[in-house]
Amino acid sequence: MNRIEKKFAELKAAKRKALIVFVSAGDPNLGTTEQLVPALFAAGADIVEIGIPFSDPMADGPVIQASYVRALKKGTALGGILAMTKRIRPLCNGGIVYMSAFNLIFHHGVKAFARHAAQAGVDGVIIPDIIPEEGDEIVRELDKHGIAPILLSAPTSGPERIRKIAAHTRGFLYYISVTGITGKQKPSVESVKKQVLMIKRQTKLPVAVGFGISSPADAAAMAKVADGVIIGSAAVKILSEKGTREETVRRVCAFVRSVRRAMDA
């Protein structure tokens, strides 16, 4: 059982839901990411997604796209992110998940990526542009190292498709709550509830909901119908605001604590 599975089991026993927070590596710089990720766990995050900056991201809205541009301008690259992750791993008590386009993994080498991610202490990898029919190699390599491959399902995914996605997924299934990009659209709680119930009839994996969840009230509502809630653009937007590293970390963590309180209320 890796840290993601252990965390969801602990939360289920405690009748709590997972708070998953996304940040872009290297935004505004890698030093801030290194200080921020352990602080996010202390503020109430159960899992932190570290986005690997990419020039042509899929499904990411303007807020996250802009964060990737800022990170790339600072020279952020996979090698530095792996080294940073290895340094902070002992300071983090929850799951660390990378979100990466397959292009970057392929360029690094699938086997080398899985080995280096394991050495850095990564627990899972979300790959938005991998479909079940093309995911055998990366799933096999991540499995060898105890890293959870996490694929995404959408409102357009039917039962048969969900079963295929779940067969290639470990840790938790990422449900995209809207048919669109991150950040802008507000998902319907009732629609998400129906889809999550349908997904749970196809798999025993926990289901975490992301896209369009931007406030403590949004997160609290989604926590009632899913096993986990993913906050992305709202946290990244705070990172884009000017301030010292300490001020930036403090503002993001204050927001995460407010989300945690709302979900636990």
Image (cartoon, helix red, strand yellow):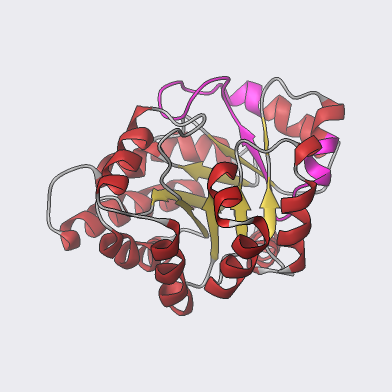
What x and y, as percent, mark residue 61?
A: 41, 28
**Residue 185 quadrant:** top left
* Side of 173 where 253 appears, left or right: left
At 61% across and 53% down in the image, what residue appears?
Answer: 125
What x and y, as percent, mark residue 240?
A: 23, 42
Q: Nearer the viewer, residue 259 or 153?
A: 153
Q: Which residues are magenta?
A: 163-192
Give the answer, above or below, for where 25 lies relative to 85: above
At 74% across and 60% down in the image, what residue appears?
Answer: 141
* Side of 84 where 6 appears, left or right: right
Q: Nearer the viewer, residue 71 or 2?
A: 71
At 40% across and 37% down in the image, what residue appears?
Answer: 55
Q: Per the image, is 226 magenta?
A: no
Quadrant location of the N terminus in the rendered image: bottom right
Q: Nearer the viewer, residue 158 or 251?
A: 158
What x and y, as percent, mark residue 96?
A: 53, 62
Give the answer, above or below, for where 240 lies relative to 46: above
At 68% across and 42% down in the image, what residue appears?
Answer: 151
What x and y, as percent, mark residue 40?
A: 39, 61
* Side of 246 where 140 appears, left or right: right
Q: Per the image, is 177 magenta?
A: yes
